[in-house]
Image: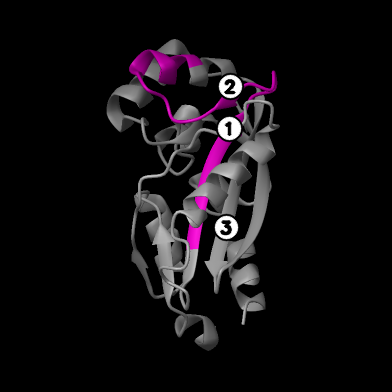
Amino acid sequence: MIDLKQKNIILVSQSPRRSQLLKELGLNFEVIVRETDEVVDSKLNARDVVCAIAQKKAEAFGNDFIDAYVITADTIVVTSAQDILGKPKSRDEAFQALKIMSGDIHEVITAVCILNKGKITTFSESTEVEFYPLSDEEIMYYIDRYEPYDKAGSYGIQEWIGRIGIKSIKGEYTNVVGLPTARLYQELKKLK
């Protein structure tokens, strides 16, 4: 742990949840964001899509911070019908996403890249989440009060909907929040 606290870490994310998760690991870091084109080959499978986006975010830094550990991440949700859900663009899109996942199982995939000394280390984690059936009223209550427009799959597991709607979770909880901290910690320890 002491060794990790000495590393110069840059988190490339506007997500307050990712920042909070890194703080909870006890790591010192700064947040820097660069606009990145997130368009990738539409023929890629879900895991490859999310890995490609995280890698594009890392590549945008090139050798700008050669001695730092630049951490990028991207999260998507994959429904049981294999539809990929990113962040909703509207209230209706958020409603439709939650309606699709209601009473069903979906997969949350987060890819993480660590750029250091010109080398990119990429990994991904997958967590299976099952919702209880949600009523239209419950879905609208959540959307209107929590405005989940910055969350893949239109929900935050750490919010009200996670407290009342999650039936089961198989995998790392923090992965669903947006950053698989246990795996990230292990990967950072490997890098010298």
Instruction: From the viewer's side, name the closer residue of 18 and 156.
Output: 18
Q: Is residue 173 left or right of residue 140?
A: right
114 relative to 140, above or below:
below
Residue under numbered circle 1: 77
Q: From the image, which quarter does the C terminus lie in?
A: bottom right
Label 3 vs 1, first from the N-terminus: 1
Report the Cα–Cα distance between label 2 and label 1: 10 Å
**Residue 169 visible to an observer of this rendering:** no
Q: Secondary structure at mark 2?
A: helix
Q: Is residue 60 left or right of residue 146?
A: right
47 relative to 111, above or below:
above
Give yes or no for residue 141 being in the magenta stretch.
no
Instruction: From the viewer's side, name the closer residue of 12 and 175.
Output: 12
Label 3 vs 2, first from the N-terminus: 2
State the mark number for residue 141. none
Q: Are marks 3 and 2 in contact (CB under 8 Å)?
A: no
Q: Which tag is nearer the camera, tag 3 or tag 2?
A: 3
Q: From the image, which quarter does the N terminus lie in?
A: bottom right
- Identify the residue at image location x=36%, y=30%: 149
Asked which colour scheme the image uses, the reply is: one colour
**Residue 154 visible to an observer of this rendering:** yes
Residue under numbered circle 3: 113
Q: Is residue 27 left or right of residue 130?
A: left
Q: Amino acid at mark 3?
A: Cys
What range is drawn magenta here? 71-96
Q: Amino acid at mark 2?
A: Met
State the mark number for residue 101. 2
Q: Secondary structure at mark 1?
A: strand
